[in-house]
Image (spheres, rainbow, N blue to C red):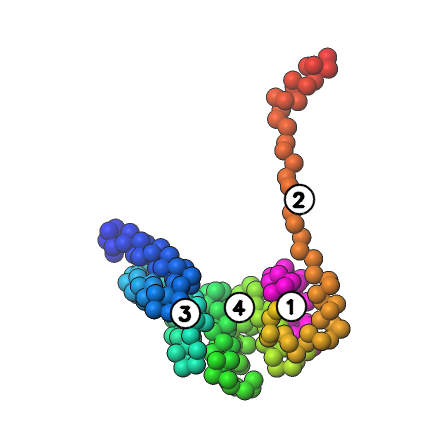
Amino acid sequence: MSVSNYLLSGFKFKKAKELSANACLENNEKSDALFQQAYDNFGSISSARIQYPEALHCWGLALINQARQKSDEIASKLFEEAIMKFNLCETVKENHLGASLDKGVALMEQANVKKLSLDNDLYSKAKDSFLKAEQIQQGTASYNLACLYALQNNKEACFKSLKKAQDYGIFPDKQTILDDTDLDNVKQLAEFDEFINSLVYQIRPPLKKRKSKKTKEVKNAKKE
């Protein structure tokens, strides 16, 4: 791969991410046009680049975001395309955390759009994808699993996953959790109130400015 092509692929990747981010801020035709431009740029990135797996992952994320602007069959098709990108990403780079995690998200959202029963294979695949993400890095998919278990009325597994998410510090802010409709089946339980009340978001104290050695020497000289 020539240096010029390598640099061009890097530019395309950056441009694709910018276009997909801007597309999320728009609606309808303008949004669709920006997403398509992003996909064109993602598609032109060489598989020889070290960032190729990340490009596939970002491509999948863009498809998820576009799907969320749509409904019914169009949304389902976009979620399916996103899942395909994540599968390819995992083929190129095994144990890609983002691909495993976000594939599970796409599978769940596709199942929801299609109004499938909770015992449908898409939910099983989503669970498998989240569990794979957990194997790669503990805690990263615990909250997602909690949401899935809540939807399936598996309350014990839900609270176990919520506790794990809390232990690893990987979970949304309190208001987002309260607004999350995936958790509706457990929100009326005392255990949920206990979990919410136990949430502590630690804020790192400001670092104290260290006095330089020279400053200390000046102060000591004044005392003398």
Nearer the viewer's eye, disc 2 or disc 4?
2
Q: CA distance from mark 1 to mark 3?
A: 25 Å
Q: Residues within 10 Å of mark 2 (few under 14, many from 20)?
A: few
Residue sitting at x 60%, y 71%: 180
Residue under numbered circle 1: 178
Q: CA distance from mark 4 to mark 3?
A: 23 Å
Q: CA distance from mark 1 to mark 2?
A: 27 Å
The secondary element bearing badge 3 is classed as helix
Q: Amino acid at mark 1?
A: Leu
Highlighted range, magenta: 156-177
Q: Earlier in the sequence, mark 1 or mark 4?
A: 4
Residue 66's tag is 3
Nearer the viewer's eye, disc 1 or disc 2?
1
Instruction: State the image coordinates of residue 114 (x, y, percent, origin top left).
Output: 47, 83
Q: Earlier in the sequence, mark 1 or mark 2?
A: 1
Query: Does the magenta segment cover residue 224?
Result: no
Q: Residues within 10 Å of mark 3 (few under 14, many from 20)?
A: many
Residue under numbered circle 4: 133
